[in-house]
Image: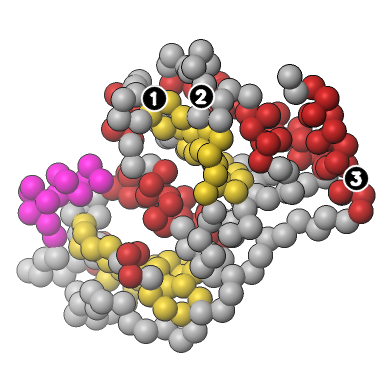
């Protein structure tokens, strides 16, 4: 039976999805889940969609020179509610935007607010590198410590996207509603090209693609929220990813040093 083939070129990656649909279903032939599988598929569909969108935005807009930061709270600063944590997140982004504006640099980010297993609220942010020292970012946060990890050099961040969303059930238990994450409006969301393939079935194993390799842990099999079989995989370019560097000329460095000097004078 025909299936839908989707491709999204995001940075140095190509995200491929293949799935069946009731729109192109042929009577008497089924690729659908049973009742138990359908219930599970529907529960996972929204989470999988959010992870896919974050993956596309991460792959298209960030690279290994950028920051992946966890914002934590010190004793006495911990928010009592998700609403309070969101307010802290908004204030942090506002202050950060002010610093980037003084530098003349665009601010690009994806930020997720999360509750841990014990209910402790914190934030994960992927942030474009404008040359700010981590001590300055921690000063701007001003609620506790920050922890940083490098982004993978291959430019493929589906594993990071899944990690950033893995505690959604604890987010709900803490009183969270709606979407856990948000992003700057200036992120590029590449188009997804879609075509109908007239074939008896799709190949469940990804085919080779010239100039790319298939990232093994990106292969995913399952069902759509309507219960139709699907497959997802991510191809990664064999060529080094293109860096999204901000041009730091002499004037930029002077502005950055001025901001750092001001921070050092204000710090206790």
Q: Quadrant of the C terminus?
A: top right
Q: Name the spot of residue 59 as percent of width and height, x first.
A: 52, 60
Is residue 158 one of those drawn in magenta? no
Q: Which residue is mark 2?
A: 73
Q: Which residue is mark 1?
A: 120
Residue 248 vertical placement versus 28 (above, below): above
- Tell me which label, 1 or 2, sits earlier in the chain: 2
Which corner quadrant of the image does residue 173 belong to?
A: top left
Separation of residues labelled 1 and 2 (CA atoms): 9 Å
- Circle 1 SS class: loop
Q: Which residue is outermost to the front? A: 268
Disc assigned to residue 107: none
Residue 185 seen in the figure: no
Which corner quadrant of the image does residue 132 belong to?
A: top right
Horizontal side, residue 177 vs residue 89: left or right: left
Foreground of the two, 158 or 133: 133
- Tell me which label, 2 or 3, sits earlier in the chain: 2
């Amino acid at each position: 039976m025909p299936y839908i083939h989707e491709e999204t070129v995001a940075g140095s990656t190509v995200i491929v999805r293949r799935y069946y649909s009731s729109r192109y279903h042929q009577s008497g032939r089924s690729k659908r889940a049973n009742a138990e599988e359908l219930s599970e598929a529907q529960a996972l569909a929204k989470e999988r969609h959010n992870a896919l969108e974050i993956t596309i935005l991460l792959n298209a807009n960030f690279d290994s020179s950028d920051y992946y930061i966890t914002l934590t709270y010190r004793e006495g600063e911990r928010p009592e509610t998700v609403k309070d944590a969101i307010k802290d997140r908004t204030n942090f982004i506002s202050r950060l935007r002010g610093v980037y504006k003084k530098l003349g640099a665009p601010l690009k980010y994806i930020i997720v607010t999360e509750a841990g297993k014990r209910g402790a609220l914190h934030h994960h942010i992927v942030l474009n590198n404008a040359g700010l020292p981590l001590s300055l970012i921690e000063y701007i946060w001003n609620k506790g410590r920050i922890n940083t990890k490098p982004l993978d050099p291959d430019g493929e961040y589906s594993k990071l996207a899944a990690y950033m969303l893995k505690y959604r059930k604890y987010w709900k238990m803490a009183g969270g509603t709606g979407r856990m994450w948000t992003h700057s409006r200036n992120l590029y969301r590449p188009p997804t090209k879609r075509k109908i393939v007239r074939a008896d079935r799709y190949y469940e194993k990804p085919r080779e693609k010239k100039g790319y390799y298939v990232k093994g842990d990106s292969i995913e099999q399952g069902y759509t929220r309507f219960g139709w079989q699907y497959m997802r995989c991510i191809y990664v370019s064999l060529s080094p990813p293109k860096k999204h560097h901000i041009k730091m000329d002499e004037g930029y460095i002077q502005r950055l040093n001025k901001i750092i000097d001001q921070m050092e004078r204000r710090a206790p």
